[in-house]
C-alpha cells in the first residue's frame, strides 16, 4: 500500500483528492506545515510520496529532506493556479504538478508512475508461474526470504508480492537500496541515530528497521553492504533489536526481512565480501528469478504492457506492438532484463508512427534499427570491433558507459544494471568524465 503524505491546506479540494487516492489503495495522511511533516518522517512514520501545496517553498522543502537523507518523490498541488506556478514548482524539483479540483484519472496516473506499485507483476511464462506460486507459499511465514537474480529481473516486485500476500500486508513495506547509500551513512539509515551522534545529526532520526516495524523490510542488493556493518545486521536479525547510532539502549523491532542480490552469493562468501553466517540467516527461504531471455513468453506480455503504460504516461494514442517488432524483441538477448525492455518500449512509443509500433521504432542496445525480415538472421560481427583496436581500455570503457547512459535516456540506475556495475561506481566514473570535460547525459 502506498503511503501518501499531503502537506499544506486541507480544504474540500484536498479532501476530494485524498478520497480518490485512498480509493486507489493509498494510505493518506495530512500535515498542515512542512515542519510537522518532517517531524513525522524523522519519527519513522514514513511516506512513499509527498504532495506539497504550491504556495509553500518547495525547493527549501526538498533541500531540507535531502539534508537529512530522506529521498521522496514530490508532487506539487494547487487550487486555481496559473501555469507559471506549475512550471516554477517543476523547476524547484517537483516531479509532477496536480491541479485541484482533482481529476481521478490524473491522480491514478501519478500514483502509478511515481509510486511504482500500480504495475504489479506482468507475466505469462511458466517459469514465472513457478516462482510466484512458490512466493505465495512462502508469504504467510515470517521467515527471511532471499531473492536472487540478475539486475532488472524484478526482484523488488517479487519482494512486494511476498509482502502483499503475507499476514503483514496491512503494515509498512520499507525498502533500502544498500548499493545506493554511502557506506558511512548506511548504518544510520538502517538503525537510525540520536541527536548529536555525528556531525549533521540535528535531530533524532528513526531508521528503516523501526520504520518497518509490524511490516516488511527489504534490503535491496544486500551484498553491497560493508562487511563491518554486516555484523551489526546479523545481530539485529538474531536479537530482533537494533542500536541507534549514538543511542544508549537497544530498541526492539518486529519485522519480516527480505533481501535481494544479483551476485553469486557463494562466490561472495568465498571472496570474503559477505559473511557466511549472515547468508544462512537471510536465506531461510529462497526465490531465484530467471533472466528475461529464459522467459520468452514474458517478452511479449511485458512489451504490450509497457507500450500501453508509456502511451498513457505521455498522453499518446495507444498502439499495439506489431508482429515484426515482436519478432525483433523475441530475438534479443536482454542483458538488462525487464528494465532494458521497458526502456526499449518507452523509446518505441515516442518514435512510432502509424497504427502500430513497427520495427523502425525498436532500438536495441548496441544495434541500429533493422527490418523485421532480418530479425531472425544470425547476428553479424560487431562492426565497431576494428575501431577499438589501438585504443586504451579506459577510452573504450568510457564510450561504453556513455553510450549505455544515452540508451537509458540518462537513467543512472538502469545504466548501472545494464553495465553490471554498482550505482556508486557509475557515479564515480561520470564525475571523472565530467572533470575531464566529457559531455555526460543529464540525469533522467
Image (cartoon, grey):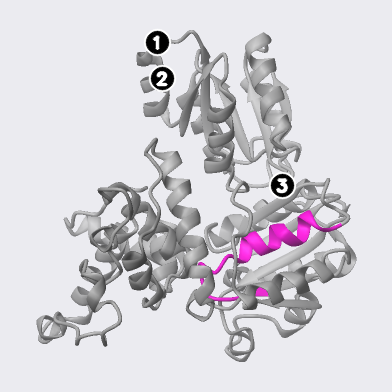
Would you name the residue on which mark 1 appears?
Answer: 82
* Part of the protein shown in magenta: 147-166
Q: CA distance from mark 1 to mark 2?
A: 7 Å
**Image quarter for residue 187?**
bottom right
Query: On the rendered image, what quadrant is the N terminus found in?
Result: top right
In the image: residue 318, left or right of residue 61: left
163 in the magenta segment:
yes
Figure check: 437 above or below 296: above
Packing grade of label 1 (10 A; few <14, some 14-19, many >=20) is: few
Horizontal relation, residue 207 to residue 254: left or right: left
Query: Mark 2 or mark 3, which is nearer to you?
Result: 2
Determine the residue positioned at 58% across, 78% down: 290
Q: Report the residue marked by disc 2.
A: 86
Residue 121 location in percent, x, y? Answer: 62, 59
Question: Of all residues shown, which one is farthest toward the bottom?
Answer: 270
* Residue occupying image coordinates x 83% and y 46%: 170
Query: Residue 147: where, in percent of width, then height?
Result: 67, 72
441 or 394, nearer to the observer: 441
Number of labels in the image equals 3
Mark found first going from the N terminus, 1 or 3: 1
- The answer to which of marks 2 and 3 sits earlier in the sequence is 2
Q: How far separated are the C-alphas under marks 2 and 3?
A: 37 Å
* Disc marking residue 193: 3
- Determine the secondary structure under disc 2: helix
Amino acid at each position: 500500500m502506498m503511503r501518501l503524505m499531503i502537506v499544506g491546506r486541507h480544504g474540500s479540494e484536498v479532501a476530494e483528492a485524498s478520497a480518490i487516492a485512498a480509493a486507489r489503495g493509498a494510505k493518506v495522511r495530512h500535515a498542515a506545515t512542512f515542519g510537522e511533516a518532517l517531524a513525522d518522517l524523522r519519527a519513522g512514520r514514513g511516506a512513499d510520496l509527498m504532495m506539497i501545496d504550491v504556495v509553500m517553498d518547495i525547493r527549501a522543502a526538498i533541500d531540507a529532506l535531502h539534508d537529512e537523507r530522506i529521498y521522496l518523490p514530490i508532487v506539487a498541488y494547487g487550487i486555481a493556479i496559473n501555469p507559471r506556478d506549475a512550471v516554477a514548482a517543476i523547476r524547484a524539483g517537483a516531479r509532477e504538478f496536480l491541479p485541484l479540483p482533482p481529476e481521478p484519472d490524473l491522480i491514478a496516473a501519478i500514483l502509478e508512475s511515481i509510486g511504482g506499485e500500480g504495475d504489479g507483476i506482468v507475466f505469462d511464462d511458466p517459469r514465472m508461474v513457478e516462482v510466484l506460486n512458490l512466493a505465495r507459499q512462502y508469504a504467510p511465514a515470517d521467515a527471511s526470504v532471499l531473492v536472487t537474480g540478475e539486475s532488472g529481473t524484478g526482484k523488488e516486485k517479487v519482494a512486494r508480492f511476498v509482502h502483499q500476500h503475507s499476514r503483514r500486508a496491512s503494515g509498512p513495506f520499507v525498502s533500502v537500496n544498500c548499493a545506493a547509500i554511502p557506506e558511512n551513512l548506511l548504518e544510520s539509515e538502517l538503525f537510525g541515530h540520536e541527536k548529536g551522534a555525528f556531525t549533521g545529526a540535528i535531530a533524532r532520526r528513526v531508521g528503516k528497521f523501526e520504520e518497518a516495524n509490524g511490516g516488511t523490510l527489504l534490503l535491496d542488493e544486500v551484498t553491497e553492504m560493508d562487511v563491518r556493518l554486516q555484523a551489526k545486521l546479523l545481530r539485529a536479525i538474531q536479537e530482533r533489536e537494533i542500536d541507534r547510532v549514538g543511542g544508549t539502549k537497544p530498541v526492539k523491532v518486529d519485522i519480516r526481512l527480505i533481501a535481494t542480490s544479483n551476485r553469486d552469493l557463494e562466490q561472495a562468501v568465498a571472496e570474503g565480501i559477505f559473511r557466511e553466517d549472515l547468508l544462512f540467516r537471510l536465506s531461510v527461504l529462497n526465490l531465484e528469478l530467471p533472466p528475461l531471455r529464459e522467459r520468452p513468453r514474458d517478452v511479449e506480455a511485458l512489451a504490450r504492457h509497457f507500450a500501453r503504460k508509456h502511451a498513457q504516461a505521455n498522453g499518446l494514442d495507444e498502439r499495439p506492438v506489431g508482429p515484426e517488432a515482436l519478432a525483433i524483441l523475441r530475438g534479443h538477448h536482454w542483458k538488462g532484463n525487464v528494465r532494458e525492455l521497458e526502456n526499449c518500449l518507452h523509446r518505441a512509443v515516442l518514435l512510432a508512427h502509424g497504427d502500430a509500433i513497427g520495427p523502425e521504432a525498436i532500438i536495441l542496445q548496441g544495434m541500429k534499427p533493422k527490418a523485421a525480415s532480418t530479425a531472425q538472421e544470425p547476428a553479424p560481427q560487431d562492426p565497431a570491433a576494428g575501431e577499438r583496436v589501438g585504443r586504451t581500455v579506459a577510452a573504450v570503457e568510457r564510450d561504453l558507459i556513455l553510450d549505455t547512459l544515452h540508451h537509458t535516456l540518462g537513467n543512472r540506475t538502469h545504466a548501472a544494471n545494464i553495465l553490471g556495475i554498482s550505482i556508486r561506481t557509475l557515479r564515480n566514473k561520470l564525475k571523472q568524465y565530467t572533470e575531464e570535460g566529457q559531455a555526460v547525459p543529464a540525469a533522467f
